[in-house]
Amino acid sequence: MRFEDIKKLHQRKFREQFSCFLLEGEHLVQELQKAASHDARLRASEIYLTREYAHWTSELPIHVLNSRHMAQLSETRSPQGIAAVVPLLATPAQHPGERAIYLHEIQDPGNLGTILRSLAWFGGFRCLLSPNSVDVHNGKSVRASMGAIFHVPVEPDVPLQALPGRFGRIASLDLQGKPISAPEFRDFDCYIYGNEARGLPREALSGMNATRFTIAGTRAIESLNVAATVNISQYELTRSS
């Protein structure tokens, strides 16, 4: 891939055009290599590094860049000196027993990456993103995921109204509702979480008979961060099972 095209991968339209995304940092490249050992599609990835990483070994193709060129690829203030171009992969079909979380118009890439990291830790879930959500291959999302992007199936652009046709029982996390400590909280196929500022569209949820649950707290502040809400929910689902 041409260097000038790699630089364009910071923009979503070019990630879609070239069907590739860029990741940075030693840990993420290590996670890529581990994932590529199990998924042949990822072996089309290519690693770019500076001479400080001349010791690096990989079955993936390696290209050496000078520090100036590496800085042009990096979105971080202090480039680590190692990055990779990775092909965009089709999301695998949902397998029996796999459940889903649905994120409605999530905007913060750091939140999305943190959520993927939790889903990878607990396992058993895929992530569905509504239209107008942040791109999962945004550089900050990829970095915040700490490699979870290779372990959690992510479906973009899933309309909210498509959920009832796919899932028999749907729950939503809200400021009102039953506590997540209730035993029935673990019985749903899909769990819906709202936008960081606007929350969830209640009229649409009432039309699909989504059961509302809440995380008990003092209410000293208005709400929990969406990533924290997902994390607490995932722990509760695991603890209760």
Image (cartoon, helix red, strand yellow):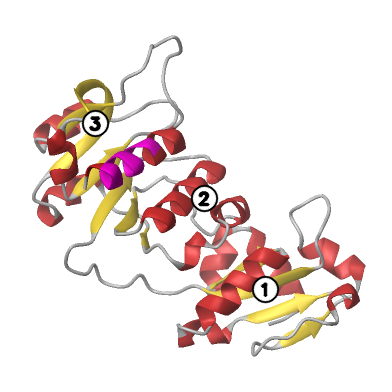
Give the Cα distance between marks 1 and 3: 40 Å
Q: Which residue is mark 1?
A: 84
Residue at image mark 2: 113
Secondary structure, magenta segment, majority class: helix
Q: Earlier in the sequence, mark 3 or mark 2?
A: 2
Left or right, residue 175 beside residue 111: left
Residue identifier under label 3: 180
Disc on the earlier residue, 1 or 3: 1
Q: Is residue 114 magenta?
A: no
Residue 22 picture location, percent across and down? 64, 67
Q: Residue at x 34, y 34 (%)?
A: 194
Q: Which percent across, then down, holds residue 219?
A: 39, 12
Please say if 86 is above or below 159. Answer: below
The range drawn in magenta is: 232-239
Marks 1/3 in contact by CB < 8 Å: the verdict is no
Q: Is 116 drawn above or below residue 13 in the view shown?
A: above
Dividing the picture into quarters, in which one does residue 138 lie?
A: bottom right
Q: Position of residue 49 (x, y in %)?
A: 80, 75
The amino acid beneath tag 3 is Ile
Between 25 and 184, the one nearer to me in the picture: 184
Q: Is residue 51 left or right of residue 162?
A: right
Name which residue type carries label 2: Gly
Task: Classify 10 Å Cα crowding around label 3: few (below 14), some (14-19), many (20 and above).
Answer: many
